[in-house]
Each structure stands twice: as structure tokens, then as C-alpha cells.
Amino acid sequence: MKWIIPYLVLLPAPLFAHEVWLDTTDFYVPAETPISLTLQNGEEFQGSDLVYNDRRFVRFERWHDGRIYPVLGRLGDRPAVSERPLDEGLHVFVHESTMAQLTYRAWDKFAAFAAHKDFADIQARHESRGLPETGFKEAYVRYVKALVGVGGAVGQDQITGMETEFVALANPYTDDVAGGMPLQLLYQGAPRADAQVELFERAPDGSVQITLHRTNGQGRVTLPVRAGHDYLVDAVVLRVPSDQVQADTGAVWETLWASLTFEIPQ
């Protein structure tokens, strides 16, 4: 199979970047199967479980067949999602975190992270604002989606209204994606053009390959996929915080992380 990819770079590891995503052993299950999803924090599509904690998210939902259902749990639940058998169709899980923050003690670490996420001009931007190179804060929010197919898995992904998010333009469980999986990246409800998209591909043996891609002028990207593999897609916005965020957190930079997980069935 020949892939036509406008922008592709092979990477050994996503340096200085900790993604958050929803994961499971099987994103595509038969009808009458209970669903469990872990909320993961880590690198290279491998991480540690985060517990269910309603103080640390703004939204945790399941979208299905035109309706929105809250994802309910108790503080400390692991896995974060445990659902009884669900109706057949495509289920879209949505998780939006509360804002958190971190302090950079060394400029090199922030610069390397920013460069990896495609913000090579960060030093000029930082210096133009007269910011210190050490002891400064970054605020961040995670916008997480996962596509889970049940039974016939009929359905389509939807725009959920998060500040940044991926929207799948095909259903990986019912549509022919031999030519690639088409996605659109949104920021504040509009297509995000010429943005870096990081793709983590996990093989059945657990090995992970990482590639970089770019959205086109309509915020769209078609990603190479293979049957039997799981996928994590990631994109980051790095911006100057609003006056309110700066006042609330003391942060001088803000990052918004969009992720999407799914599998391509055999």
C-alpha cells in the first residue's frame, strides 16, 4: 500500500511532552460487552493511570446517537471509566480537564518542549515580552476524546465544543480507511490550519511508532493507519494567557492539548 503524506518525520520519542489520553485494550467490542477506559498520562503511548476525580475535570461525557451522557464515578476509581454494556453504535468519550500549572526551573527544558511541539520561535517570543528564563509558569488544559465502537458501531464523531479538539471525518470501525484516516483539528470552533499533528501508532506487540504530520488550510489531515493497530493523535496550542488566567495562576504561557484515540479493527 502506498501512502501519500504531505509531511512526515519519524521520531524516536516525544521529548519533554506528557500526553493525556483515554485508553483501553479494545476500542471496538461486540454488543453486550462492558466498557472500561483508563485515563492515561505519559509518553510514547505508555503511561500511568489517572483516577476518576471530578475536581480535576470540567467535563466527562459520552456522546452517542445524538445524546450526551455524563461519565459517572467515585473519587479514586481506577479505571476512570467503567460502563455497563452500551447500545450498539459509535460512542465518543470526551474529557476536559481543569486548568493546571507547572513551573520551569530551566529554560532549556521549556525551549525543547516548545520546539518539539512546533514552536521554534519561542525564544524570540519569550524575550520580546521581557520574561525571565527561569522560574516562570505555564498553565495547561487537556482536551481528550476517544472513539469506541460497539457491535455494528454505526455513527459519526461530532464537534463537542471544546476549545481545541480533533474531529474524526470517518468512522474507523465502519468506513474504509485504507487510504488513511481523515481528521479535522479545531481551535475555538474554527479549523486550525498548518498545525503539527503527532501520531502514535501502537502495534499488537506493544511497540510504538511516532510520526509528525501537518493540517492543510482547512485544518484537515489524513493519517496513515493499519488494521489491528491502536492510535493516539495529539496537537498542542501554545499561546499567551488571557489577563484573567495570568491573574489567577501567574502563568506567562498557556498550552491547550488535544488528543484522540481509536483503533483500526482487523
Image (cartoon, grey):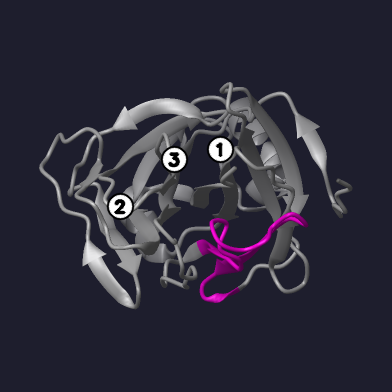
Residue sitting at 51 percent across and 62 percent down? 165
Q: Nearer the viewer, residue 262 or 9?
A: 262
Disc 2 marks which amino acid? Thr
Residue occupying the point 34% across, 51% down: 99
Per the image, is 196 magenta?
no
Query: Which mark is nearer the camera, 1 or 3?
Result: 3
Contact? badges 1 and 2 (CB < 8 Å)? no
Q: Quadrant of residue 173?
A: bottom right
User: Disc 2 designates what residue?
Assistant: 98
Q: CA distance from mark 1 to mark 2?
A: 26 Å
N-terminal of the pair, mark 1 or mark 2, is 2
The magenta stretch spans residue 170 = yes
Separation (CA) of disc 1 from disc 3: 28 Å
Q: Is residue 12 visible?
A: yes
Mark 1 vs mark 2, foreground winner is: 2
Q: Is residue 40 above or below residue 249?
A: above
Q: Residue at x 85, y 49 (%)?
A: 3
Q: CB under 8 Å between callouts 1 and 3? A: no
Foreground tag (2 vs 3): 3
The 10 Å Cα crowd at callout 3, few under 14, some 14 to 19, many 20 or more, is: many
> Given the image, on which type of amino acid does mark 1 rest?
Pro
Disc marking residue 20 = 3
Residue 158: image location, x then y, percent:
47, 72
State whether residue 51 is above or below residue 47.
below
User: Can you give x and y, in whole percent of width and height, for residue 237 in the image?
Assistant: 58, 55
- Mark 2 or mark 3: name the one nearer the start of the chain: 3
- Disc 2 element: loop
- Say the numbered circle drawn on residue 226: none
Residue stretch in magenta: 165-190
How many marks the image carries: the answer is 3
Disc 1 target residue: 132
